[in-house]
Image (cartoon, rainbow, N blue to C red):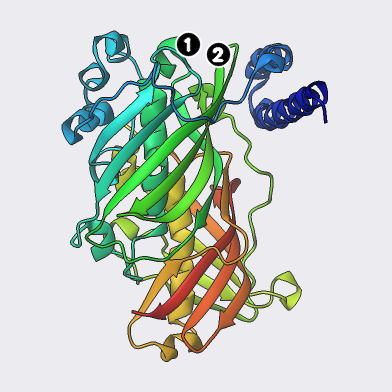
Amino acid sequence: MNNNQSNTAVIKMDDEKKIQRIRRLLEILDENLSQSSAVHNALLDNQLAALRISSMDLTLNTSPIHPDIEKKIAFTKNQLREFGTGSIAKCFGDDYMILDPRPSPRIPNGDLLMIDSIPEITGERHKIAPPASSISEYTIDPTAWFLRENPYRRVPLAILMELALQPCGIISAYIGTSLHLPPENNRFRNLDGFIRFTSQPDLSGKTITNHAVLLDAFSSGGMHIQKYAFSLSAGRSKFLEGESTFGYFTSEAMANQSGLGQPVPVVSAGNSSLVEAGNSTGHFALTDFVNFDSSNNEGKNLIITGVKELSADEWFYANHFYQDPVMPGSLGAEAIVQGLWTYFTHSEQARRFKNPVLAFDTHEEPFTWKYRGQVTPQNKQVLYRVEIIKELPTSTETRITAHADFWVDGLHIYSFKNISAVIKEG
């Protein structure tokens, strides 16, 4: 192959990457077009038309941070707390003072803040594009609330997700995204992602390091989408990796989402067992009742349905987020895991283990999620439906793989695929 042919091949590969990225963005934007009010639709139509033209010039850059633009600072826990509920400028500097008096995207605070410090963060401020990255750390106290209150006695899925995702919000803020978007685009939301588990370590007492990287950023007419990659390590051992997409939206766009479209399930009266979900306490009391039903889905798979009645003062609203109370999607995933654990403790499999613990693994496909709605203090009830796809007992463990969906007040807002839980002797 001569040089001209080689260059042509590289150009074609680059073009294919551009096309894939544009398709992904248009998919997200088209969903929001269909989920917003008529007034907001008109605005998004204009943004979408401009995007189809401007996106042709976008290029993907996932290379390491170039030394010429690298900047390193240390964010302390106190600075992160300021970002959570206090002065954003006290965390990021005086040029962020414009954000302090108005509603602006924040990170979780209090019991949901899963970062102790950020030893390194890189990127060019006021340039909302790669390259940018961070290294963050969090030490898991063996007496932490999420270990004390968690019945399956390993670090919960919700906490693993928060450890993975929270640094993405730090990077986005650090490069100045909110300084360049219209003030009304102040709802920072996770849209989807995947996680692949590479091992199952016991993380109690360990310091977890997150390496997060901004992969891509799209903007048009005030709408902004960002994609990140991340990996979690304990010491020198990586145990989790994945990618996730986030977006900046107006409060109107979030309030008018119409969800993912599935009707709320009807719990069957036949071949079912209704139990009180009393395994979890405190923060993780995410389900009031769980129903096990083998009569749905043409008898192929067991169906688990869980319900929780909500109050306006649920603990997580104050912690996620300041001036923008919303239930973390990770707690929706955790409610589903709690439902799986309740099923396990009421099954014949539970008798095989004297001291069972539950861990997460990627047996075949990565765990994926999709969020197209939110739970706010105005909502009254959440309901989830879990379908167990595989249940495989061996001499040493039981592996359960499930898909799940989540509704709030009858609106289908979350979808989870390939939740793979491994129950074994502790």
> Depth check: 151 or 55 in front?
55
Res. 324 visible in picture: no
- The image shows residue 234 at horizontal and vertical percentages of 32, 55
Image quadrant in which the C terminus is located: bottom left
Q: Is residue 38 above or below residue 244?
A: above
Outermost residue, front side: 2
Q: Residues within 10 Å of mark 2 (few under 14, many from 20)?
A: some
Q: Quadrant of residue 97?
A: top left
Q: Which residue is mark 1?
A: 182
Amino acid type shown at disc 1 = Pro
Residue 18 shows which numbered tag? none
**Quadrant in which the N terminus is drawn:** top right
In the image, which disc is placed on residue 222? Answer: 2
263 sits to left or right of 309: right
Amino acid, disc 2: Gly
Answer whether residue 285 is visible to the viewer in this image.
yes
Instruction: Find residue 199 and report its horizontal and vertical position in percent.
Output: 44, 64
Q: Are marks 2 and 1 in contact (CB under 8 Å)?
A: yes
